[in-house]
Structure formats: C-alpha cells, structure tokens
Image (cartoon, rainbow, N blue to C red):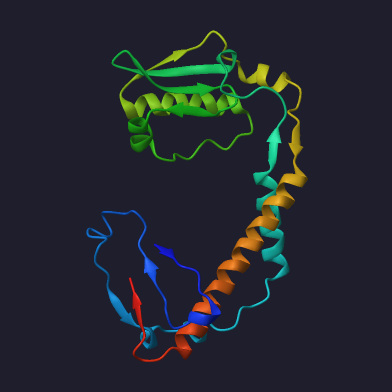
Amino acid sequence: MAISALSPSAINNFTFKPANQPSAFPNNSKSLSIPADKLININHLVGAPKAPTREMLESIDARYRAMFTRPVGPPDNRPDNIYAQVHVDGKVVATIYNTGGSEMTNDAFSRIGHPQDPATTNSVVIAQWRAEHYASVLGGNVVKASTALTPSQWEALPPRTYFFDEQAMLSFRRYSQEAAQKRHEDYERLMEAANTAKPQTNIEV
C-alpha cells in the first residue's frame, strides 16, 4: 500500500492509494472511506522508546560487521572445490563443497530443512556428513568428486583470510538509520494530522 505525501495545507485530506496488487485489491476503481478521527495513535500502548543497552549495541555492531566481512580469494562454489554431489534417479539434486557449503534444488531444500551439523571446525568433515545426510533424506546416493579433500588435507591448508568492508558498513548503517527516521517522522506526521482532523474528514483506502 502506497501512502501519498501529506502537505501542511491539506492535513485533513488523506488518500491511501493501493499499489498494483490485484489479490489484495480486486477492484482498484473502488475505495473504502474511513473517518479520520477513528485512527488510533498507538504510542501510548508501546510506551516511550528506551535507550538500547550496551549489550544490545554490541550485538547489533557484531551483526553488522559479520554482514560486511567477506572471505578473500575465489568463491566456494567453483568446480575445483566440489566435495561430492547427491544424485537421485540419475539427476544432481545437491552439490557439497570442501568448505561445507552446499547448493541444492528447491525440492531438496524443502525436504532437508536445516539439519544440525556435527560439532567440528573441520569443513571437510561437515561436507562428508552433509552429503551422507542429504542422500539419506532424499533417497539418493553420494558421488564423491575427484577434487574432494580429506580432513587432514583441509587442516593443512593455510588459514583463510577475510576482508572487513568498513566503509560499506558505515554507508549501509547511515542509510538504514535515515530510512528509519523518515518512517518515524512520517508516522508522527500522520498521527498528528489524524488527531486534529475534523470528524467528517474521511480517509480513502
């Protein structure tokens, strides 16, 4: 639902125009009028906003940093990094990489869900477990690739390095904060206009 902008000279004239959503608005030529004085300000229900705790701020910061921390080097899903594939009726339904990551069809994903991986930091052990688990759930078989590593080979690889894109994170956070502030201001402006609207004024939906 798109909300038209409010102008100071017409705060009593709100128009809510539906977006192009036939399922929600089967007939866009009609509108539903709601008395403006029936709008309810819910601020008193949720109370005044509370300042975030230090723990909350640290958690938010950690999540942002994780979003913008990327591994350096070639991607995982390259042909020379395949550990195994799961075949069902001769078709590839899942590909598992030495790093433990996997790709699969939508149908396979809907049946596998989010299984609990073994408690290990060795990605090849996880890759092997996932391949066998996927095959068991899907009723298929594991076809190991010639590029599959052993757990000891994985351990012998140099540590993977990561790049933290701080500038991209700061830009994203600034945009998110500005967008949230604008949504809040638009809501406050709408509620103020609704509270001062005449009872006869309607809102068209």
Q: x and y percent of residue 111 in the render?
A: 33, 36
The image position of residue 184, as x and y in percent, is 57, 72
Q: Position of residue 66 (x, y in %)?
A: 67, 45
Q: Where's the N terminus, which quadrant?
A: bottom left
In the picture, measured across the screen, residue 148 lies left or right of residue 105, that is right
The C terminus sits in image quarter:
bottom left
Q: Give the residue furthest to the front.
A: 9
Q: Where 128 sits versus 26, above or below? A: above
In the image, what residue occupies the spot 44% across and 83% down?
Answer: 12
Tell me what residue is drawn at x 74 percent, y 52 percent. Answer: 170
Asked whether 119 or 47 is in front, the reply is: 47
Q: Nearer the viewer, residue 45 or 100?
A: 45
Relative to the observer, which residue lies in front, 58 or 27?
Answer: 27
Q: Is residue 1 above or below residue 197?
A: above
Q: Is residue 78 left or right of residue 199?
A: right
Of 34 and 115, the residue lying toward us: 34
Q: Position of residue 65 (x, y in %)?
A: 71, 48
Q: Residue at x 75, y 41 (%)?
A: 165
Question: Exactly how many numbered labels are in the figure?
Answer: 0
Residue 173 location, quadrant: bottom right
